[in-house]
Image (spheres, rainbow, N blue to C red):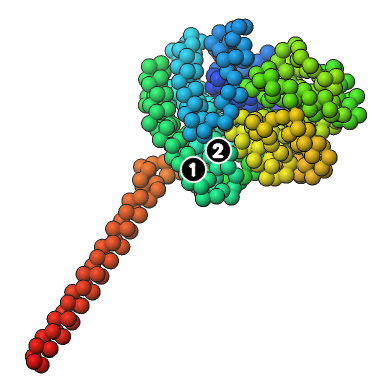
Amino acid sequence: MIKLVVVLLFTLNVGESARILGIYPLPGNSHYHLGSALFRELAERGHDVTVINTFGEKIPPKNGTYRDILLTGLFEEKPKDKFKEWNMFKREGLNPFVGAYVVARMADKFIAQSIQHENVQNLLNSDEKFDVVIVDNFLNDAYKAFATHFDAPLILVNPTFSSFWVNSLVGNPSPSSYIPNIMSDYYHPMTFCERLTNSLLDLFNALLYELYVYPKQNEVVQKYIPRGGDLNDILYNASLVLLNSHPTLNPPVPHVPNMIEVGGFHMKPPKKLPQDLQEFFDSATEGVIYFSMGSNLKGVQFPEEKRNAFIQAFSKLKQKVLWKWEVDELPGKPPNVKLSKWAPQQDILAHPNLKLFITHGGFVSSVETAYHGVPILAIPIFGDQKVNANFAKANGFGRFITYKEISEESLLENINEMLNNPKYLENAKKRSKLFHDREVSPMDTAVYWVEYVIRHRGAPHLRVAGLDLPWYKYFLLDVIAFIGLTCCSLLFVTRYIFKTICKKICSKKTTKKLKAH
């Protein structure tokens, strides 16, 4: 009897197993960290998972099957160029229109190179079949044609909240009147000038992608993806969008039925820190401040003036400071500062002695601080970081300093305010409580919807009808034009009739006067 049950369970598992292709080709650790969590979980639940990526899994999942298709050698840094080529600090303060163009141009450099990679081409020219294709929705538009090539439904994983990068692809409304563009530093309510600029920025991005980015990406599809078809046939036919967002992470906004919020799906229960870090935190009687600018912003790229401002400010604190620093030495390092080339951020944020997180304000870091209820002092540099910093300030669990404002005085003022004013910790804990208060865990939600799309072969019933309309119909421009012309016609006819009546009345009065004489 027991053997029969085991056989039945095994058969059931195999019957439900699906072949899944994940695509995370860019060398962004924070993005891959999200995708890796999802793909590992899908494999652990018995699915056959293949992932195109630049990192690779050192310890593959135990259940199901898992395979990396590595873009070996493509994005590896040469020692002499390390930390120099991609200095994001040089992009701080960019006009949002210029910033949007810079981000769009990044796609040209990476995507064509990665799709030409031998390992990717071998996959494309194989006879493999997949039940679903899951793509990181950031600068990867050409890769979405893999869904057409393999005749599989397409799922997008958006690394942040909904934005112009995904809204138009699924027909999601995003009014410029109260939803700030992800490249701006606005926050609701916006002034008239901010709403005007926000509207122009949304329009600029729409035109930029429709007229430049998508045609460029389509050229790559036509050249390197044998059965990719036309990119426009797949761009607006995504079955599902998994959003790494939640109302505790960003202001609530509209979502169409095939957009599912799973913010925090990559989070896991905290583990004990490595011994040196564990001792460092446990011995901090006054607490610890954690300082990290993420994976793309390197601490060593700070100009000497800015770096010295941090050193001087930290030296005057009674708290210990853990500083994510990419090289062995830091000239002038205070005794209360510990350097770490790599830090297990989730486990650090979970330690009870952590008092404050100084961060660039990236969205993944924002998710992790919400999970653990940690106040943040943000130093936003680029992209969505300014929007996230504004959200933290507006909701009372954080403050921010602009890059230009960094000085010993501004750092000490903000750090001491946040350490001594209990409202920041209280608001962070309230946000964490809201973040955790869900009917189903975000990972279970993400897996359910992936399997839902597979079960229902793309779930086309979730697709909104607005995607089938040309832009002038979607925005009711033809209806507005008709109403406008009708109103003008009525006014013209009314004016004509009134004028004609007036002329007749005047003519009769003139005739009577002539007869009287």
Between discs 1 and 2, the one toward the N terminus: 2
User: In which quarter of the view is residue 245 placed?
Assistant: top right
User: In which quarter of the view is residue 309 placed?
Assistant: top right
Verify CB contact (< 8 Å) between mark 1 and mark 2: yes
Identify which amino acid the numbered label 2 is placed on. Ser
Identify which amino acid the numbered label 1 is placed on. Thr
Question: Can you say whether 439 is above or below 266 in the image?
Answer: below
Q: Nearer the viewer, residue 266 or 187?
A: 187
User: In which quarter of the view is residue 249 placed?
Assistant: top right
Position of 420 with respect to 259 (left or right) is: right
What is the x, y in percent for residue 364? 66, 30
| SS type, badge 2 | loop
Q: Nearer the viewer, residue 453 or 506?
A: 506
User: Circle 2 is placed at which residue position?
Assistant: 184
> Crowding at label 1, few (<14), some or many (≥20) Cα neighbours within 10 Å?
some
Judge whether residue 282 can be spotted in this image. yes
Position of 5 with respect to 145 (left or right) is: right
Question: Can you say whether 452 is above or below 485 in the image?
Answer: above
Q: Which residue is farthest bottom?
A: 516
Judge whether residue 265 can be spotted in this image. no
